[in-house]
Amino acid sequence: MNITLLGTGVGIPQNERVQSGLIVDTGHGPVLFDCGSGVLQRIYQSAYKHTSIENVFLSHLHLDHCADFLSLVKANWLCDVTRINLWGPVGTRKWWNDLMCTYSYMQNKIDININELSPGQTVKIDGLEIVCITTVHALPSLGFLISFAGRTMLYTGDTEPVDDIARASDGIDLLIHECSFPDTFEVDNHTTPKRLAEMLRGITIGKIILTHLYPQTRGFEEEMVSVIANACKCHVEIGHDLQEIEI
Ligand SMILES: [Zn+2]
Ligand SMILES: [Zn+2]
């Protein structure tokens, strides 16, 4: 399973980080998870063609996770590719239908197959199994436990540290967890290093990559990594845009 981090940033612009998005590739075509602003450009800069993306999962409908989906659909349409399967939390269908009311010139020219998901549901695509995990955020949101050929990773989307993620993470090869702020901030709906370390203490994970980094994390990277690595006894690193990981 090959993973490409497309965007490791948030709603505030940063030099090296666009908003959220990553590709999981098992050799059966890239599957896109989240599609925030800047992700379409990162796809162009990656090894993938935007026209090859047939399956998209949205963790939630905050703009920094879905803003470029409309741009992706339009870009594909301009290249004569009109079908995408879209999975997202409850509300995804209304969100898309509302967008199509505004951009009605696209409405009958594209074919978006929408499936709304809830925690516990499983989706299977060409041997890839995706289980939806409960997360805690400001609106309906999902984490995705992704397995293929005996390898497993979990992408959290936006969340506070929650037990369901810890349980689902035990024994996996890769955890891509949001870590929005350093420990100098106290936040709801997002994760800080100490709280993540407490949640993951004693859990066996191959490797942890931190993503969804606010500009406020700049200068705290080493500290963030060591707090979590000490608790988990595994390799922890800060993710960066266009980083490729193989598990
Ligand atoms: Zn969010
Ligand atoms: Zn976000």
Image (cartoon, helix red, strand yellow):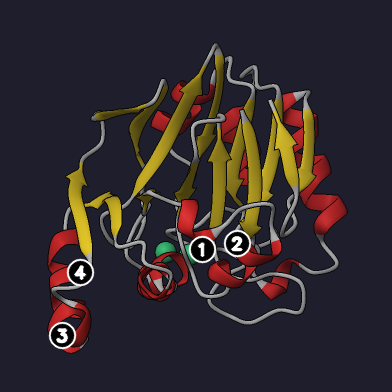
Query: Badge 2 is on which residue?
Result: 43
Mark closest to the chain's N terminus, 4 or 1: 4
**For the residue labelled by badge 3, is the local secondary structure a helix, a strand or a loop?**
helix
Q: Nearer the viewer, residue 178 or 242?
A: 242
Cα separation, mark 3 vs mark 2, equals 26 Å
Q: Nearer the viewer, residue 141 or 185?
A: 141
* x, y percent for residue 17: 69, 69
**For the residue labelled by badge 1, is the local secondary structure a helix, a strand or a loop?**
loop
Cα separation, mark 1 vs mark 2, equals 31 Å
Instruction: Give the quadrant of residue 173.
Output: top right
Cα separation, mark 3 vs mark 1, equals 39 Å
Q: Nearer the viewer, residue 153 or 49?
A: 49
Q: Is residue 100 found left or right of 54 in the rendered image?
A: left
Instruction: Give the quadrant of residue 242.
Output: bottom right
Is any part of residue 34 visible from this angle? Answer: yes
Identify the amino acid type marked 4. Answer: Trp
**For the residue labelled by badge 2, is the local secondary structure a helix, a strand or a loop?**
helix
Quarter of the picture holding the C terminus: top right
Query: Badge 3 is on which residue?
Result: 104
Query: Badge 1 is on which residue?
Result: 187
* x, y percent for residue 171: 58, 14
